[in-house]
Amino acid sequence: MKASKAYLFLGLTSLLFVACAEDKNIPPKARKVSSTILQNSTVSQELEQLSAYGFFKGELSKLEPETNVYPYDINTPLFSNYALKERFVYLPDATKMRFEENGPMRFEDGSILIKNFRYEHLEEDDQTNASKLVETRLLLNREGKWIPLNYIWNEEQTDAYLNYTGSVVPIKYRHTDGKLKTFEYVVPNNNQCKNCHSIDNEISPVGMTAAQLNKEYSFISAQINQLNYFKTEERLIGMNNLDEVVVMPIWNEVSSGNIENRAHAYLDANCAHCHSKRGSAKNSGLYLEYQQTDQRARGVYKPPVAAGKGSGDFQYGIVPGKAEESIFTYRMASVDPAIRMPELGRSVVHQEGLELIKAYINQMQSSN
Amino acid sequence: MKKLVLGLVAIALVILVVSSLSSKLPSYEPDRDYLDLEEALVKEFIFAKDSSVIELPEGHFLFSQSLSLDNKKHLTIRGKGMDKTVLSFKGQKSGAEGIKITNSQHITLEDFTIEDAAGDNLKVSETDTLIIRRIRSAWTGEVSEENGAYALYPVLSTNVLIEQSEVIGSSDAGIYVGQSDKVIIRNNKAFFNVAGVESENSTNVEIYENEVFNNTSGLLIFNLPGLTMSGGHVKAHNNLVYDNNLSNFAVKGSIVSAVPKGTGVIVMATKDVTLFDNEIKDHKTSNMSIVSYELFALEQEDAELSDDAEDRGLRGIDADFKNDLDYNPYSGRVYAYQNRFENRFFVPTFSNDFGLLWAFKNGFKIPDIAYDGIIAEDGKLQDKAHLICLKNNEGASFAYLDASNDFEGFTTDDKMFECEGE
């Protein structure tokens, strides 16, 4: 008798657990249905395979650039789930980039920006090198307009295939703490590209600014500044004196700037593509371009406008001296799609970036 | 025998406790049988051509990502009816919105349901000529702060019509129009939201024949500082606003988290507002309030911040509108006439300062119309900038709070505010 009561009790408590475990964030099951119930079907005119562009020679996944394809790097990149990003620009014969002091360089018709997302790590045995390209994103300049296209690499790593609808790819990588971790990498759908790549509602490159390019890059030559390199190669016109070009600090290189400047650089690269007066988050009143000097626009004691649950019971973007009471760190530390910032392209927390922003907020004076 | 009585009492107590717990927040639980047509439907959205119609089939479709549209012209998205076509974003992995439309012209959405997005169910930004018609936008299950913020959210848009739609379960506002111009919100139903309908920093807004009930607060006409535009010229008439007494389940920090439950209509810091022929009843805090942004800034005091931060924060809010030279934190030229008021509650809620104020200053009576009386330092009550006109409001009781003078001039006499104005 007693025993059966105990079982009943156990049964009831386990029921309780089941009830509690049901989370709003766990998607329910859905049955696949055929797309024939839709009326329209559409066919893309774009190249189906990355290899068809001829950007690279030899084994495609080694990304050995052909003529007219130039590798480049930027000072402080957008964090993308700890992926290694390999960037190239394709400039058709005799075309040039035009220097812009602020904002991205200007490009001629036919230019293409190429960004590859790769994971490299040692397997559990600490011997085997693993490398996996996930996606290659292109921005194609056609008569002044930019077209975003996305290619997803196959399992064999022999080619990447045009994708419009996005995808979820399981990823294994070695985290900065040395541990092997896995997560679901979300490849954005084509319309989502514009969420970040938008200036005044037009699709635009983001990272190709003078301040971001102003650095040496070993892939080209350890001693030559990239801007100078493009200039001497006669691929960049309009730049007068390199010494007058602003340098974006490198977010994680202490010698490149003080903590405030590096945090501003980080926020510029990770937030300002939307959070600027010309970006898609202009309605928020939060503006985080590197040049922004208005502390309120930078979030200091700024209440949220339409953050919804993104505010996380906190009242201000930044409370100086109190990272733990600031919405910035709350949203950076979340992976919930409704809370996290950036909204897209981040499925894991950027621990080191978060630490930088915490330190930046904590060193701010909370004086009167 | 004694045991039996005790037992019965215990059961009664349990029922009481359980029912009071469960009646606290309502639920919306439709039957769903999800189908996966994600890839094909996402493609439809991406390749949508100008001047075309996306026909959504009948069924309950589940998505792991947002559906977005950008830079489209003359596009219609049409379902088979809000009970037949359901787009659910429950557990989505990518994007915060359900449907997101940006930078477009002449967009019509009609006859379907949008459910359970992580953030906003429908967000439309920088779009001219938008029609949202017979759309149900809801969060399922018990209402909770885990629900997304806005059910229908046009922002920075012009020529917006929202009609015959339903909004359910938003943890912020159901129908929320922000920083937009020329907006009509009519014949909609809003329930189980924190705010039923909210017009924020929008101009030339007309809100009529809506049924707004069972929210924390019914209809908000707000104007906040520091945004791209200032709100004003809002008309609300022939609305039925009742029983908005739901506990506030908004995340703190949002402006609506400071809205007291049991409020029917609130006009805050907005100029040129006309409210007429509305039926507003059964609210535990007040049927209609006309207030300044300063009052809200004060209301937010109880946030869980350290003292220092709170100090600075209040000054922050202060600076927020004092630095915004174009911003005027006071309501003015608010005309309320021919509204019908009723209240089945005799005692106010004590969950907020207003309820307590009514207890101390108003003999526990809940006023139908409350005006905080906070005006600019160089202004005078009832001067042109701060005019409040009340007339022919059936059965309306009144309270003038004199909130800037510690409620010293508190009065229920509305003679001073009887005017035509217009």
Image: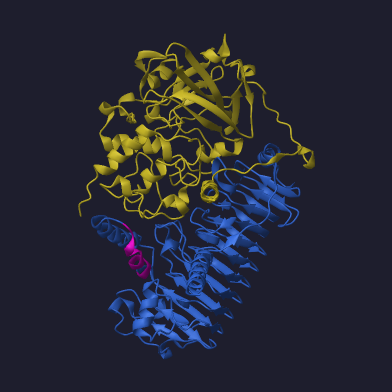
Front residue of B133/B193: it is: B193
A271 over B152 or under it: above or below: above
Chain A as rendered: colour: yellow
Q: Is residue B299 magenta?
A: yes
> Would you place residue B347 above or below residue A323 in this image?
below
Is the stretch drawn in magenta largely helix, strand or loop?
helix
Q: Is residue B110 left or right of residue B414?
A: right
What residue occupies the far top of the structure in this picture?
A58
Residue at the extreme left of the image, as rendered: A367
Q: Position of residue B284 (x, y in %)?
A: 47, 76
Residue B228: image x %, image y %?
Answer: 45, 56
Residue at image coords 56%, 17%:
A93
Q: Is residue A355 visible?
A: yes
* Residue B131 colored in magenta in the image: no
Is residue B232 something that shows in the picture? no
Q: Say which of B266 and A46 sits in front.
A: B266
Tell me, what colour scheme is on the image? Answer: by chain
In this rendering, position of residue B404 left or right of residue A168? left
The number of numbered discs placed on residues in the rendered structure image is 0
Colour for chain B in the figure: blue
Q: Which residue is located at x 70 percent, y 54 percent?
A: B112
Task: Give, as a single range, the part of the protein colored magenta.
Answer: B295-304
The image position of residue B294, as x and y in percent, is 35, 68
Residue at the (60%, 61%) spot, across then down:
B167
Give the vertical position of A351 relative to B304 (above or below). Answer: above
Q: Is residue A33 above or below residue A208?
A: below
- Residue A54: where, in percent of width, then height? 60, 15
Q: Quadrant of residue B414?
A: bottom left
In the displayed structure image, the side of residue B166 where residue B80 appears, left or right: right
